[in-house]
Image (cartoon, rainbow, N blue to C red):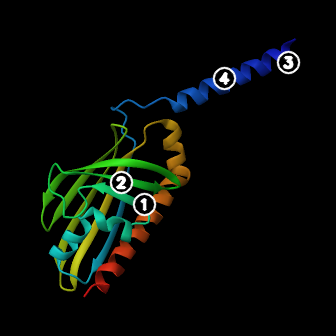
Amino acid sequence: MKRPLRWIGAILAAVAVAALLALPLPESVDLTTEIVTVTSIERPDSAVFDYVTTPAHWPDWHPSSLSVRGATDHPLSVGEQVTEEFRVAGRRGSVVWTVAVRDRPRKWVIIGKIDGKPAGTVRYSLTPVASGTRFERVFVYRSPSLWFAAANVLFVRARIQQESDEAVARLKKTLEALP
């Protein structure tokens, strides 16, 4: 009689732990991740800025960007939005990006929402250097649950860093190949 009760207790405990791990974290719990990628691009900062802030170009250089729709044919200004279909770390989805900061040609920030919930922030910082432009891309996202936080530590963060590194390398190659 004790053995079946132990199994039931163990199963109930496992279900309770899984439920706790899946619960949304309160906003006061700050489990954010910052992915930073930097490169030097042999192009003027204004040319780099205009290219990277024009969403139609994103699928050309960022492997996670599958398509974009909305205001895609020009460098976006504060308040403008674009919807991007993505595949990040194996997860597909759709995000609405809104431009929060535009200081051409130095800084550009977009804030993403998935289903109306915060999904992350992307910040571009551009600095003129002797050989062209120092380009820094920072992607910041928050773990919505302990389950995601654990997965992030184990494999998601590394995969996103790899995708970001590839994206910025492709951006450099693409821009430096332009006439």
- Amino acid under label 1? Leu
Element type at mark 4: helix
- Amino acid under label 2? Glu
* Residue at the disc numbered 4: 13
**CA separation in Å, label 2 and label 3:** 53 Å
Q: Is residue 77 left or right of residue 170?
A: left
Tell me, for residue 80, which label it has, or none.
none
Tell me, for residue 66, which label it has, or none.
1
* Residue at the disc numbered 2: 84
Between marks 2 and 4 in the image, the one whose residue lies nearer the viewer: 2
- Amino acid under label 3? Arg
> In this view of the protein, which residue sits in the foreground, 54 or 166?
54
**CA separation in Å, label 1 and label 3:** 53 Å
> In this view of the protein, which residue sits in the foreground, 130 or 168?
168
Q: Could you tell me residue 4's position as x and y percent?
A: 83, 17
Label 2 crowd bin: few (<14), some (14–19), many (20+), radius 10 Å: many
Nearer-N-terminus badge (2/3): 3
Quadrant of res 118: top left
**CA separation in Å, label 2 and label 4:** 40 Å
The answer to the question of whether label 4 and label 3 lie on touching residues, with beta carbons closer than 8 A, is: no
* Residue at the disc numbered 3: 3
Label 4 crowd bin: few (<14), some (14–19), many (20+), radius 10 Å: few
Q: Classify 134 as above or below 67.
A: below
- Amino acid under label 4? Ala
